[in-house]
């Protein structure tokens, strides 16, 4: 119901876990349209902080930046995407990454932004302040996303409809592509707003805007693209470097992921297995220059001209990977 799949005869699989729009109100659509009933009843849509967090969690620019639909329609890549907004089901998290604020019986102070987000994000704040003061501010200003936690039975049904179906789709695509080509090069496509970020109690806390540049301690600068591969455990260097070379020739500043972008959790670590021919690489594209101009405020607007300027680079990367 929420997992959309495109099958083509190609060794490349494009995955978009965080670009779903179901559950995000836009134009004449209500935010509750298409949501599982249990969520539609429990999400605190009357809260500005909740509505802002729902939008901020969406990698809205990814479909336009990557040309995902056209790459699939042209038969250059297969695709899988989650249509449900990320805050309601984050398929790049472990299935058991759950907070008791979201599901009855789970630990209270863990995985605030786990498989289902249980608390709101703050507006950009100064994350360089004393850690204790920052934690106090976060706990004071965060709001619960739900009116009350889901029962374990309701949560399991939600997982069945969304998370389990999505991951079954990934495994089926891997098996099908490997049967045809012997390998599968799986690209997980993301966008990252150009802001510093830290974690408090398992939840994201955005800092001040980050400038374009080599990543520095404190996150005051960020590159254009971060390649996530768990220090090449999830993909052989030749596939990672092929993407790096294409993006670098296109004038983009590219770095390998470290810290929270290492790739030792989520889809990259779960499925990356070069010995079995499955190479998983996350592409975290930092949306400098106003590509997602209102994301830090919860907006999902995309500057189409700026976003589409990167499509040629993604297309070339896919075409290069098909030939390796």
Image (cartoon, rainbow, N blue to C red):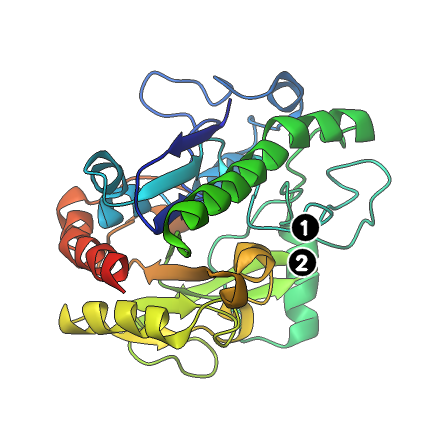
Give residue 305's mark: none
Do labels 2 and 1 touch, CB within 8 Å? Answer: yes
Left or right: 264 in relation to 9: right
Total numbered badges shown on the rendered structure: 2
Residue 185 visible in this rendered orientation of the protein: no
* Res. 150 image quadrant: top right
As helix, strand or loop, the secondary structure at mark 1 comes to loop
In percent of the image, x 71 and y 28: which residue is there? 147
Q: Quadrant of residue 286?
A: bottom left
User: In the picture shown, does residue 87 fall above or below 108?
Assistant: above
> Percent position (x, y) of residue 255?
35, 76
Q: Name the residue beneath numbered marker 2.
A: 202
Q: CA distance from mark 2 to mark 1?
A: 5 Å
Q: Residue 76: which quarter of the image? A: top left
Q: Position of residue 209 (x, y in %)?
A: 36, 65
Query: Residue 77: percent from the left, percent from the top?
Result: 29, 45
**Secondary element at tag 2:** loop
- Looking at the image, the residue that sits furthest to the right is 105
Viewer-nearest residue: 276 or 237: 276
List x then y, in percent, for residue 155. 73, 30
According to the picture, the residue beneath numbered tag 1 turns out to be: 112
- Classify mark 2: residues with Cα within 10 Å, few (<14), some (14-19) or many (20+): some
Q: Nearer the viewer, residue 78 or 119?
A: 78
**Residue pictured at 70% horizontal, 60% vertical:** 201
Q: Residue at x 35, y 25 (%)?
A: 26
Say whether disc 2 or disc 1 marks the residue closer to the N-terminus.
Answer: 1
The residue shown at (67%, 58%) is 202
Taking depth in this image into account, of 217 and 263 the one nearest to the observer is 263
| 10 Å crowding of disc 1: few (<14), some (14-19), many (20+) | many
**Any part of residue 146 in sight:** yes
Please identify the quadrant where the C terminus is shown. bottom left
In the figure, 261 relative to 231: above or below?
Answer: above
């Amino acid at each position: 119901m929420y997992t959309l799949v495109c099958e083509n005869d190609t060794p490349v699989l494009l995955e978009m876990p965080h670009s779903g729009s179901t559950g995000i109100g836009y134009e004449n659509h209500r935010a509750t349209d298409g949501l599982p009933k249990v969520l539609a009843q429990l999400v605190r849509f009357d809260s500005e902080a909740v509505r802002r967090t729902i939008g901020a969690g969406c990698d809205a620019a990814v479909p336009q930046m990557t040309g995902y639909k056209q790459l699939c329609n042209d038969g250059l890549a297969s695709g899988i995407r989650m249509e449900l907004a990320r805050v309601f089901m984050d398929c790049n998290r472990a299935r058991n990454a759950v907070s008791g604020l979201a599901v009855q019986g789970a630990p209270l102070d863990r995985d605030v932004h786990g498989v289902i987000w249980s608390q709101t994000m703050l507006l950009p704040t100064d994350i360089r302040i004393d850690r204790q003061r920052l934690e106090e501010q976060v706990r004071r200003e965060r709001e619960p996303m739900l009116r009350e936690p889901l029962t374990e039975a309701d949560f399991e049904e939600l997982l069945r409809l969304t998370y389990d179906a999505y991951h079954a789709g990934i495994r089926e695509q891997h098996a099908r592509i490997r049967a045809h080509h012997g390998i599968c090069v799986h690209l997980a496509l993301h966008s990252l707003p150009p802001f510093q970020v830290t974690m408090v109690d398992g939840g994201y806390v955005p800092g001040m805007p980050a400038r374009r540049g080599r990543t520095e301690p404190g996150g005051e600068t960020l590159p254009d693209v971060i390649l996530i591969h768990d220090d090449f455990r999830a993909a052989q260097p030749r596939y990672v470097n092929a993407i790096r070379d294409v993006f670098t020739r296109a004038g983009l500043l590219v770095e390998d992921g470290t810290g929270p972008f290492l790739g030792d959790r989520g889809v990259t670590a779960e499925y990356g297995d070069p010995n079995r021919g499955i190479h998983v690489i996350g592409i975290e594209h930092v949306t400098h220059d106003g590509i997602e101009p209102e994301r830090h405020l919860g907006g999902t607007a995309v500057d189409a001209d700026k976003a589409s300027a990167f499509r040629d680079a993604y297309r070339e990367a896919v075409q290069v990977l098909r030939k390796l």
